[in-house]
Image (cartoon, rainbow, N blue to C red):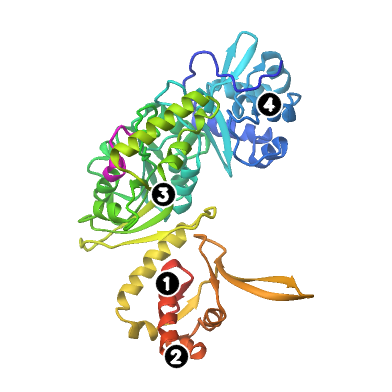
């Protein structure tokens, strides 16, 4: 009978290993030759990129996939976590690929069946190994795959060239591998040595030979060192548990986020950037109050890129989804988490990427908070860097009078679209929307006056001249000036000189 859920290998496999950098890269090449790539997988399973081994869709995936070719066998083993017969493996998977999989410790033979020792998921050009999703029970050092927070951090990281970079709490190593593409050297740290083993294997698998892994808690492995770029995806979840190292810090409330934020500035070289995922007990009257207090005296400028605000039930639900197929345990976990939040007096939880820039003058810095749209993120590191540069320019423009004499232009990535509606026998123009094609997914609806102002701001005239062309009253002039400031702050406008 066809299995209806993932079946873990007998015992617990060790993390995969790279016999040499060359054999790891060759393994990745052979997997791609076999079709182990995102677009091929999505075609075979008729799904998007959210492939969960514990998904209720697993029986459907298996029947759609079959087991009559090499790719089907590989996907069963390394994506869906379903064993195959040894005979099927030998019949369909090439001897060279089998040898490389076995050499990396990725095949677990059990009598007449074979299990995949780890999960392998392609992400664009990368191939990332992690523990199978269904193998987490009772293992605090479980190493998960790439989740949405990891993707968000990657998209918001401010990248340069030739930096010395630090990936704090590296997990499966995805951030370190991305850093390795532009940094001179990368240090990846984690208290979980199983995670470091995966990170080292993934670095080798993806040809990242400039990544060094170091065991230890938070900044302990790099004490006294400074970096040009720090990224961190710590166990920031405000959780009553201590079940998983990747999720639960064991510290009360939002103390882990506070610790990472307070400790990061000492690890930054002057002019360096840090991109940190954090969560905190949010005060609706001043959402940025706690992160702001953590940065007092840090010598850093900061953007708090606020991704979401959740109530306790939302947070407890998100972080206990693995229990969905165990209703009683799921209910107990929700009650336990909600009781914890009541005890701490937490009514709202904020989530953000906090981007820091170490000042070179030693003075205390500023913090700006930006609420990001709920739209899907895309690579935006250049946009985030531009926010800091524009904020610097605006600090030089210390009055409305000076700003009015500056030439401003709409950025090249800006697009204006118009909706029209068919009614009463004809088409009628409705809303105009300004949006950015690249970077942070900001958008804004425009009224007729604002749309004319946007057209005027082409860099050929001062803001005063552009406003004079579209508004007449003093009140409208003041409104237009405030709007221009806001458009500069989010990146719709830039200084033309």
Q: Which of marks 2 and 3 is in front?
A: 2
Which x, y percent locates residue 382? 46, 60
Q: What element does badge 1 sit on?
A: helix
For the residues labelled 4 and 1, the Cα–Cα distance comes to 51 Å
Q: What element does badge 4 sit on?
A: helix
Q: Which residue lies under the disc numbered 3?
A: 183
Q: Nearer the viewer, mark 4 or mark 2?
A: 2
Q: Are marks 3 and 4 in contact (CB under 8 Å)?
A: no
Q: Which residue lies under the disc numbered 1?
A: 486
* Mark 3 nearby-residue class (10 Å; few <14, some 14–19, many ≥20): many
Q: Which of marks 3 and 4 is in front?
A: 4
Q: In the rendered picture of this protein, how many numbered marks are placed on residues?
A: 4
* Mark 4 nearby-residue class (10 Å; few <14, some 14–19, many ≥20): some
**Residue at position x 65%, y 28% in the image:** 58
Q: Earlier in the sequence, mark 3 or mark 4?
A: 4
Please indicate, yes or no, whether residue 305 appears anywhere in the rendered image.
yes
Q: Which of marks 2 and 3 is nearer the N terminus?
A: 3
Q: Which of marks 4 and 1 is nearer the N terminus?
A: 4
Which x, y percent locates residue 91? 73, 18
Which x, y percent locates residue 448? 57, 80
Residue 235 circle label: none
Residue 59 circle label: 4
The quadrant holding residue 301 is bottom left
For the residues labelled 1 and 3, the Cα–Cα distance comes to 33 Å
**Does 251 lie within the magenta span?**
yes
Q: Earlier in the sequence, mark 4 or mark 2?
A: 4
For the residues labelled 1 and 2, the Cα–Cα distance comes to 20 Å
Q: Earlier in the sequence, mark 1 or mark 2?
A: 2
Instruction: Establish if 485 lies above or below 326.
Output: below
Which x, y percent locates residue 418? 64, 72
């Amino acid at each position: 009978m066809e299995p209806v859920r993932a079946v873990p290998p007998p015992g617990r496999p060790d993390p995969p290993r790279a016999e040499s950098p060359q054999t790891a890269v060759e393994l990745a090449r052979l997997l791609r030759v076999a079709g182990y790539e995102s677009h091929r997988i999505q075609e075979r399973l008729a799904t998007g990129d959210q492939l969960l081994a514990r998904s209720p869709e697993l029986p459907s995936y298996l029947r759609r996939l079959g087991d009559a070719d090499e790719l089907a066998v590989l996907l069963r083993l390394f994506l869906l976590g379903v064993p195959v017969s040894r005979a099927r493996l030998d019949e369909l998977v090439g001897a060279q690929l089998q040898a490389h999989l076995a050499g990396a410790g990725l095949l677990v033979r059990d009598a007449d069946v074979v299990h995949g020792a780890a999960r392998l998921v392609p992400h664009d050009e990368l191939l990332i190994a992690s523990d199978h999703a269904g193998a987490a029970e009772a293992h605090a050092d479980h190493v998960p795959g790439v989740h949405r927070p990891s993707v968000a951090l990657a998209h918001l990281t401010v990248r340069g060239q030739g930096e010395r970079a630090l990936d704090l709490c590296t997990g499966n190593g995805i951030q370190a591998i991305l850093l390795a593409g532009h940094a001179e050297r990368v240090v990846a740290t984690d208290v979980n040595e199983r995670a470091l083993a995966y990170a080292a294997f993934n670095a080798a698998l993806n040809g990242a030979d400039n990544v060094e892994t170091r065991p230890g808690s938070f900044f302990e492995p790099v004490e006294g060192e400074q970096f040009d770029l720090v990224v961190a995806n710590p166990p920031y979840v405000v959780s009553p548990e201590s079940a998983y190292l990747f999720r639960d810090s064991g510290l009360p409330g939002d103390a882990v986020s506070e610790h990472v934020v307070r400790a990061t500035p000492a690890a930054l070289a002057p002019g360096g950037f840090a991109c940190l995922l954090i969560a905190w007990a949010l005060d609706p009257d001043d959402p940025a109050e706690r992160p702001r207090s953590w940065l007092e005296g840090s010598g850093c400028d900061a953007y708090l890129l606020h991704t979401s605000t959740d109530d306790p039930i939302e947070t407890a639900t998100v972080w206990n989804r693995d229990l969905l197929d165990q209703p009683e345990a799921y209910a107990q976990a929700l009650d336990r988490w909600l009781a914890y939040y009541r005890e701490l007096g937490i009514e709202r939880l904020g989530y953000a990427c906090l981007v820091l820039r170490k000042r070179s003058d030693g003075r205390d810095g500023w913090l700006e908070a930006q609420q990001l749209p709920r739209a899907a993120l895309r690579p935006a590191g250049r946009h985030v860097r531009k926010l800091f540069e524009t904020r610097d320019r605006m600090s030089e423009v210390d009055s409305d009078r000076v700003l009015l004499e500056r030439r401003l232009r709409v950025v090249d990535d800006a697009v204006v679209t118009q909706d029209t509606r068919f009614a009463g026998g004809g088409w009628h123009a409705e809303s105009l929307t300004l949006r950015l094609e690249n970077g942070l997914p900001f958008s804004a609806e425009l009224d007729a006056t604002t749309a004319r102002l946007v057209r005027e701001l082409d860099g050929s005239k001062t803001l005063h001249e552009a406003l004079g062309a579209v508004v007449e009253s003093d009140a409208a002039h003041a409104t237009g000036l405030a709007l221009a400031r806001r458009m500069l702050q989010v990146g719709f406008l830039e200084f033309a000189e």
